[in-house]
Amino acid sequence: MNRSLRRRWPDCLIAALLFAISLAVYGATLTPSLSYKSPDGNELATVPYVLGLAHATGYPLHTWLGKLFTYLPMGDVAHRVNLMSAVLGAAGVGLLYWILLMLIGERQTAWRARLAAVFSALLFAFSHTFWSQTGIAEVYTSNLFMLALTLLLLLLWARVVEREEQERAGRRRGEPWWRGLALSWRSLPLLFLAALSLGLSLGAHMSSLGFAPAIGLFVLLISWRTALSPAGWVAGIAGFGLGALQFLWLPYKAGTLNDRMMVRSTPSTWRGFYNYTLGAFPQFKFAFGWAQVPDRIVIYLDLLVQQFSLPGVILGLVGMWVLLYRRPKRFFLLMGMYLVQVIFFTQYAAFDLDVFFIPAHFLFALFIGFGLWQVMEWLTAGVRRAGSAIHLGGWTYRLARGAPIGLAVLGLLLGVGREVGANWEHNDYSEDVAINDFYENVFRLLPADSVLLGRGGVFGYDMFYYRLVYDLRPDVVMPHLATPDPAPLSMSDRPIFTTERGAQGRPGGPGSLPPNLLPADAWYVPLLLGATPERRGLGGGRPELVLWQLRDAPPALIVPAGEVAPQHRAEVPLDGKTLVGYDLDSAEVPAGEAVHLTLYWRLDRPDSLRVSLGLGDAGLVSYEIGFGNLRRYLQEHRPATGDWVVVDDFWLVVPRTTDAGRAELAIGDAAPIRAWSAADDTPGLAPFAEVFIDQPNPILNWE
């Protein structure tokens, strides 16, 4: 074992432990499969398996890495791509530790530097926004990993070059000037690899291109010889160009696009290629005027405090100042990269703005670590001076000198522990199985040779996933999978089902279908209700999971009270309505499958139609009695005056995460389901039936 390796083995061990700890937490909170936590996450979970083309800007590197993870023998395909986010996120945390040690420098006190690096790595690992992206199929952890790798390679290159500059300064004068432009075999490969890493990072997120000016300035500050050397230019351009060649994937796979918005910029021409990459989403860029800039800055500062708390932000500001004073060249690199991110994305009009700041949060975590290290240095020096002044000696002096490290360890444990506790519930996706439960039951219930419609394009992969990855129910036609503009003739003489009421949605909007695809006067009759995604509220997810059947005739919605004979009488009074009774086809159901319910309602007030259904005190769905058909039914069919009962007939999905054993179906007046939380009881739920829950089958393991 050489001297360098002997000196670095503790850091290798610490970085490995940081990776393992982060991955263990991310794995415990990982989404089991598909999720609505990200608007395009289901597409990003599917495209790697089929080696297709994702939405703009294409993300070829993310796609290829995801394909490698789909070969892992665990969970379903979406789970494996989710795992990639966890692994790359944890790897980025380990690299943050190494980067901070290199920023602090080898000559500094080792254990204080290590403590500062551990603290900043864990603080970033379990920060609110970054952690949220480690459990789903998204590009932000792969982007962060590539940023960290690029930074590490740049700092390694700078260290080699600076040592060579020192050696060159000690040589005798008089050598030809052009000899100074010759680069060593040690620095040139590192420069090539750093440029390659930057080029590859564009395939995880195009915003990494904004780091190029700061990197170029850093190269110039470290070594003007490299900046002027032809070999340096060749290494940089060759590395970056080789990484950027991945975007040839876009025209190669352009024919696989099925999203109306993406097809408008198909990357099969030069113009389309630009619109799909650098010109993508122009409506989001620099969308705010000068008068709005202060508000945007406040939004960013609020997000920053959410990640690191106010003391952490103060430490970061200290770190910036100290880094400028001690290592100005590194400061200009990090600050240049940081400012590009902050300035660009404070002007970005995306609804999920917080995730775009993850690289900026990573850079700020480096400032925090540098600031913490400097504070410990100041405290240690102060204790040393105080000990000398009052003539402390022996164990008393050693105890006093170790106090700053002890306080740092205590602060590390308390700070990171508090952060994990505060963010765990929000980022725990381990029970997010609503999509899988719903669609597996959809494919069970659909009749042979039927048509299934829903959202199209990027947003339709909650449905497309099961056909593209597992080829479920090949007899079921999904006309919007092959093209964004399916024709009505493709559905002739087939029963039609859809997961979107008015499946055409907003004409021309995201995921919309052609406006004349479905008959305007069709009745949308509910067949299956899935549990509302995300038990802590909907966030950016869908408001409901319902499978509708399109019919020419209305359902048997209203029945005279005298003709009602439910299997079970209930007489559960609610606000403005009463559950008269119910039919239950079977009282036994495996978790993850559906139970067939018929509910009979007596209405006292026509303005009180919303109800909630749940298991025990856990809310499942909120819906309107009659499922939006009641008003139209009354207008068109005008039932005779007198007592009548409204009949709701549907299948209800029992979540896969439900404990085996007896459970109570419950009904209540509906508060908006997005207001429910794990900490609060679901308002007004009263049990009306009992079912027996059997053990669930694994996801996608059914016949």
Image: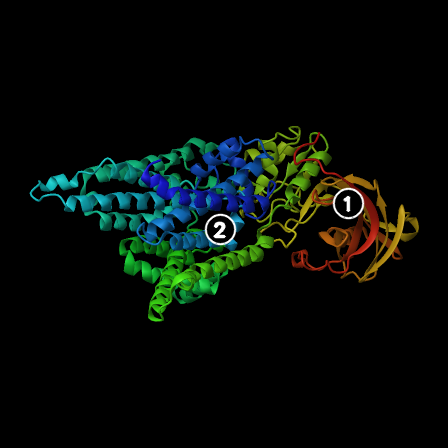
Which badge, 1 or 2, comes first in the chain's sequence? 2
Image: 458 above or below 119: above
Q: Which corner quadrant holds the C terminus?
A: top right
Quarter of the image that includes the N terminus: top left
Toward the front, the furthest residue is 394
Count of numbered badges drawn on the protein: 2
Label disc, if present, on residue 536 of the rendered structure: none
> Considering the numbered disc 1 on the image, is that residue within a helix, a strand or a loop?
loop
Looking at the image, residue 580 sits to the left or right of residue 238; the answer is right
Q: Which residue is mark 2?
A: 125
Q: Position of residue 656 (x, y in %)?
A: 70, 42
| Residue nearer the viewer, 139 or 92 | 92
- The residue sitting at the bottom extreme is 390
Give neighbour class at mark 2: few <14, some 14-19, many 20+ (Cα, 10 Å): many
Q: Amino acid at mark 2?
A: Ala
Mark 1 or mark 2: which is in front? 2
Which residue does the image show at 62% across and 32% down from the upper left? 490
Residue at point 68%, 37% (across, down): 440
Q: Is residue 650 visible?
A: yes
Residue 595 locus on image (x, y percent): 78, 42
Q: Residue at x 80, y 62 (%)?
A: 575
Q: Where residue 539 appears, x then y in whole percent?
A: 59, 54
Residue of label 1: 554
Tell me the distance, in whole angstroms, between the alpha carbons under discs 1 and 2.
54 Å
**Amino acid at circle 1:** Pro
Q: Secondary structure at mark 2?
A: helix
Image coordinates of residue 249 in percent, x first then y, are: 41, 33
- Tell me if residue 556 comes above or below residue 46 in the rendering: below
Q: How many residues crowd around disc 1 within 10 Å: few (fewer than 14), some, or many (20 or more)?
A: some
**Which of 162/377 is in front?**
377
In this picture, residue 393 sits left or right of residue 135 = left
Colour mapping used in the image: rainbow
